[in-house]
Image: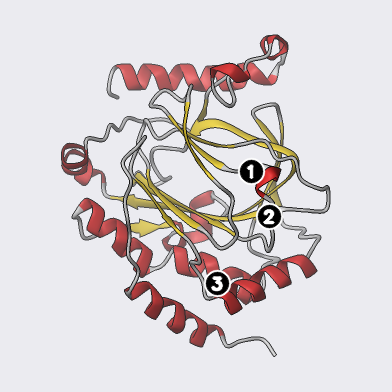
């Protein structure tokens, strides 16, 4: 019999009250929390994900050399137990962690917006999948400032040789500074600004294995921009989700044929607009 979600949320939130957060500063502030959900809850989620092998509510399907073998899903196919990580990482306990970091009171997440503000919190990547160096959008649709992210690893078993690690890059997105291994039931929190480039290393896994993740954004009012910038040495400007063209996983990942791919120039145009905004502090 499936566990009662209200009871599960209470258990998880009680555990979060005792959570110790160790922020690391390089290349930008981030924290890693292992064994995030109780093992029985994690097992229930991953077992059910394995049974629901053909989710239909695909919102986007990516197939370029910068974003490959990745799908993002809406929540119509997600049972209550599968929505639980969204509720938890988008909820008050995790928002409080970021409030404490920034020393500000009001932080909201994608779960506070209708339809998640046009974004999708459940992601799947498969064999040969890759997510190139990028920064996410700087503002929500209604102008809130995007200041933090969370990524939760929700695959039952993963061999470290399969790749799929979260990569943190330098401030221009051309050099990998840190690799965060894809370990099941791990939660990553990181501060997001105009220099928080991140990526996912190429996946070399069996074709039947999926890299399941839950994703969450956090926002604050634009009036807090100067305060959190000064206190935390962060830089913000206006930009869309911006990928580094030609160099998906750092300078060494360049291939001559990337120059001739039509998809490159969509990324190049967005990167150009980001560069102008960053140079002129727009």
Identify the mark nearer the N-term, 2 or 3. 3
Residue extending farthest right? 207
Asked if residue 37 is positioned above or below residue 140 in the image, the reply reads: below
Query: Any mark on residue 84, and which?
Result: 3
CB under 8 Å between callouts 1 and 2? yes
Task: Measure how far apart labels 2 and 3 are at the Cα level.
Answer: 21 Å
Residue extending farthest bottom? 1
Dot 1 surroundings within 10 Å: few (below 14), some, or many (20 or more)?
Answer: many
Asked if residue 175 is positioned above or below residue 32 in the image, the reply reads: above
Q: Quadrant of residue 156?
A: bottom right
Q: Say which element carries label 3.
A: helix
Q: Say which element carries label 1.
A: loop
Q: Which residue is mark 2?
A: 158
Asked if residue 233 is positioned above or below residue 83 in the image, the reply reads: above
Please name the residue shown 57% across and 19% down the image: 245
Task: Measure how far apart labels 3 and 1 are at the Cα level.
Answer: 23 Å
Q: Quadrant of the C terminus?
A: top left
């Amino acid at each position: 019999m499936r566990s009662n979600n209200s009871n599960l949320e209470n258990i998880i939130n009680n555990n979060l009250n005792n959570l110790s957060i160790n922020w690391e500063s390089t290349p930008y502030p981030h924290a890693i929390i292992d064994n995030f959900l109780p093992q029985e809850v994690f097992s229930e989620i991953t077992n059910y994900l394995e049974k629901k092998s053909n989710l239909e509510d695909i919102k986007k399907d990516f197939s370029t050399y910068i974003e490959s073998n990745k799908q993002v899903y809406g929540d119509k196919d997600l049972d209550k137990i599968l929505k639980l990580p969204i509720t938890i990482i988008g909820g008050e306990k995790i928002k409080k962690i970021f409030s404490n970091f920034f020393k500000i009171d009001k932080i909201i997440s994608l779960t506070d917006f209708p339809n998640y503000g046009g974004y999708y919190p459940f992601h799947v990547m498969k064999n040969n999948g890759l997510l190139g160096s990028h920064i996410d959008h700087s503002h929500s649709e209604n102008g809130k400032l995007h200041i933090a992210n969370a990524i939760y690893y929700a695959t039952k078993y993963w061999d470290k040789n399969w790749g799929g690690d979260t990569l943190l890059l330098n401030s221009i997105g051309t050099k990998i500074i840190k690799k965060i291994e894809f370990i099941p039931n791990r939660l990553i929190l990181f501060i997001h600004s105009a220099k928080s480039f991140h990526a996912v290393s190429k996946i070399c896994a069996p074709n039947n294995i999926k890299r399941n993740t839950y994703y969450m954004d956090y926002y604050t009012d634009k009036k807090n921009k100067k305060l959190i910038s000064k206190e935390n040495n962060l830089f913000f400007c206006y930009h869309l989700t911006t990928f580094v063209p030609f160099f998906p996983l750092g300078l060494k990942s360049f291939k001559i044929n990337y120059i001739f791919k039509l998809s490159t120039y969509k990324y190049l145009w967005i990167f150009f607009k980001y560069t102008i905004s960053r140079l002129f502090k727009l």
